[in-house]
Amino acid sequence: MKKIIFLFLIVPTISFAQNYSKAMEKKGIDTNKYIPKGLNIGDSAPLIEGISIYSTKINSNEIIKEKEIVVIFYRGEWCPVCNRYLQNLNDSLQSILDKNAEVLVIGPETFQNAEKITDKTKATFTLIPDTTLKILKDYDVLFNVTDKYQKKIKTFLRTDIAESNNQEEAQLPVPATYIVGKNGLIKWRHFNYDYTERASVKEILDYLE
């Protein structure tokens, strides 16, 4: 009898895990490899050092001396969802800047490909190509892309993900958003494996000082 009860309890758990794994794989995440979980609220925000597409040196430790930082990760200029989101973000950018915050948008692409974002979105925010993938790893958003999803992107968007990023492996970030307070800690995050679900400008504004 105890065995039967145990089976009734464990089967739904296994089923949920399997369905969750399939949902992640549908979004391109190779669940057989490392699955990022993102930084948590209260964690120390890793240093962001890089060069923007406008050749500006970026150091997050210098920025938080005066401003909070909104860190936004995107997948690539080839991603229609990213382009729409970043264009809408740019349309509301001033409302975020008025909150005494700096917006850093970070992707895994080469500088050449990242520059295409500005043409597509008319972006005026700070865009940082993370060509070494260090920032993406530090913020725990980087994952390996399934072969099936790579083929899908090649077929429908005519993009080789690894080539677009000038990397040997096809890897992408979860399009997460973090708000870093002046104390250097993560004060809010939006982390969703579903790349169609992004942080709204309203949510970002609600959590800024």
Image (cartoon, grey):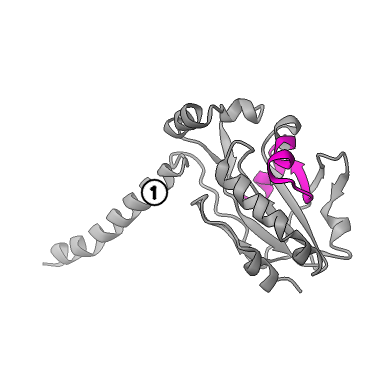
Q: Can residue 141 be seen in this view?
A: no
**What amino acid type should be assigned to the residue bearing mark 1?**
Ala
**In the rendered image of this protein, does residue 193 appear above or below residue 187?**
above
Determine whether, in the image, residue 155 is placed left or right of residue 57. left
What's the magenta region? 115-141
* Residue 61 in which image quadrant: bottom right
**Foreground: 48 or 193?**
193
* Residue 136 in which image quadrant: top right
Q: Which residue is drawn at 51% across and 46% down?
A: 35
Q: Residue at x 47, y 40 (%)?
A: 28
* Residue 13 in which image quadrant: bottom left
Q: Residue at x 42, y 42 (%)?
A: 25
Q: In which quarter of the image is the N terminus?
A: bottom left
Q: Residue at x 75, y 65 (%)?
A: 96
**Foreground: 167 or 117?**
117
Q: In which quarter of the image is the C terminus?
A: bottom right
Determine whether, in the image, residue 101 is placed left or right of residue 71. right
| The stretch drawn in magenta includes residue 135 | yes
**Foreground: 87 or 4?**
87
- Residue position marked by numbered label 1 in the rendering: 23
Q: Where is residue 180 in the image (x, y as percent from the top left)?
A: 74, 63
